Image (spheres, rainbow, N blue to C red):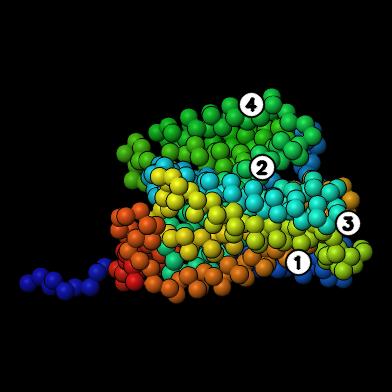
Amino acid sequence: MTNHHEPPSPAPRLSPRARLGAWVTRETTGGMLLIGAAAIALIWANSPIRDAYSALTETVLGPAALHLDLSLGTWAADGLLAIFFFVVGIELKHEFVAGGLRDVKQAGVPILAAVGGMAVPAGIYAAVVVLAGEPAALSGWAIPAATDIAFALAVLAVFGRGLPTAIRTFLLTLAVMDDLLAIVVIAIFYTDELKLQYLAASLVVIAVFAVLVRMRRMRWWLLLPLALLAWALMHEAGIHATIAGVLLGLTVPALLRHGEQHSRTHQLEDRVKPISAGIALPVFAFFSAGVSLVGGEGIAAVLAQPVVPAIVLGLVLGKVVGVLGVTFLVTRLSPLRLPDRIGVRDLLPVGLLAGIGFTVALLIAELSFTDETHISGAKAAILIASVLAALLAAIMLRWDASRARSADMNQDGQADTAGTDIGDVDEETGLIDPQQPPSRHSRRGG
């Protein structure tokens, strides 16, 4: 007699390598690695042996003949970070083609919110420095424009448990558009010479990559060199080279092809994301977060500059006002709507997360000023604003998660579809845990 009450068969055991990859790619793990690396850098950069940190960051490696003799800090920001942006491009491609952002009415909201989240902080910065009587500092107007995707997602992963994963997708879209717009600003306003021939060559290589990644077999021995070449050409063009990572990721097909069981976006993300989360992001954070607040003219003189409150207000207040304001206007005055399971209240912590600025903000600070005083003040302000925005975002995320959710959070007149929540993953595999109560995956409210 068949026993109809036999327990389900246990899931197959993963290999040690797969278990390590699953552990590293959990955003809680990746977030802690990222924050830990940044904390080590910050402590070292303000310790009695801070000169050793500076010497390490400024150590130059690479072939000069190819104009790739870069400091370790630049390799981390322009090189390793491109790996993370490649993963971001893959995730966005999936969301736009097969995920929640394939509906133009919903994808348009985070894109327009990114524009507002860039314009309002820039306006606040300009107003503060002009009112403070230092119009010469206007060259730094774009510093509070960008969002650090890696840090923002890390904070969301740690403190946003129980909130819809649609919020992560919204933040990811907003932050990528934010950074891409900031990179465009760098190319237009902060690039001494844009080499169009190298830009065109990079785009041609990316187009070849797009063709090869769609073939029946993905040939790694061709794809990897092409990706490196596209990155090098983009760097030589004078544009922030991480944009090559995003464009390469967007070329990967998100729909099933050639009878495969998993899409190419899934396959590449599965291979590259452990490298991004476990190596690229922590190393980047280590080299980018080491802002020295001691020595020189002293911390008091650094913090007394008008650029400090201009950047802090721009990142912490401007981002929230820009994101919330534009979203409110767009959803009220146009057919565009927020994705299912997201309400306007969710955008308060999202706006604060967008105020975490590191990567591109620090880059623009270096490009905006020539004197060390303004550069130090700008970097200190970025650090202060990022920590403050992260703390406020953590508080608001827990507040948001504790409140009941309605059946129509985006107020489009239709009940929200089912979805997963942040944290609904198996601790061992990093996948959606089928043993979780169904309400965690499909709740529509309450």
Image height of 164 relative to 401, above or below = above
Q: Earlier in the sequence, mark 4 or mark 3?
A: 4
Identify the mark at residue 200; answer none if there is no mark.
4
Q: In this view of the protein, which residue sits in the foreground, 83 or 188? A: 188
Q: Are marks 4 and 2 in contact (CB under 8 Å)?
A: no
Instruction: Judge the density around disc 4: few (<14), some (14-19), many (≥20) Cα neighbours within 10 Å.
Output: some
Give the tally of numbered discs. Answer: 4
Helix, strand or loop at mark 2 = helix
Residues under labels 2 and 3: Cα distance? 24 Å
Residue in the image at 69% along x and 40% along y: 185
* Type of amino acid at the residue the image marks with label 4: Ala
Image height of 350 relative to 83, above or below = below
Which residue corresponds to mark 1? 42
* Type of amino acid at the residue the image marks with label 1: Leu
Q: In this view of the protein, which residue sits in the foreground, 49 or 309? A: 309
Residue in the image at 92% along x and 63% along y: 296
Q: Earlier in the sequence, mark 1 or mark 4?
A: 1
Which residue corresponds to mark 2? 183
Instruction: Judge the density around disc 3: few (<14), some (14-19), many (≥20) Cα neighbours within 10 Å.
Output: some
Identify the mark at residue 348; answer none if there is no mark.
none
Quadrant (top left/top right/bottom left/bottom right) for the C terminus: bottom left
For the residues carrying marks 1 and 2, which lies nearer the camera in this image? 2
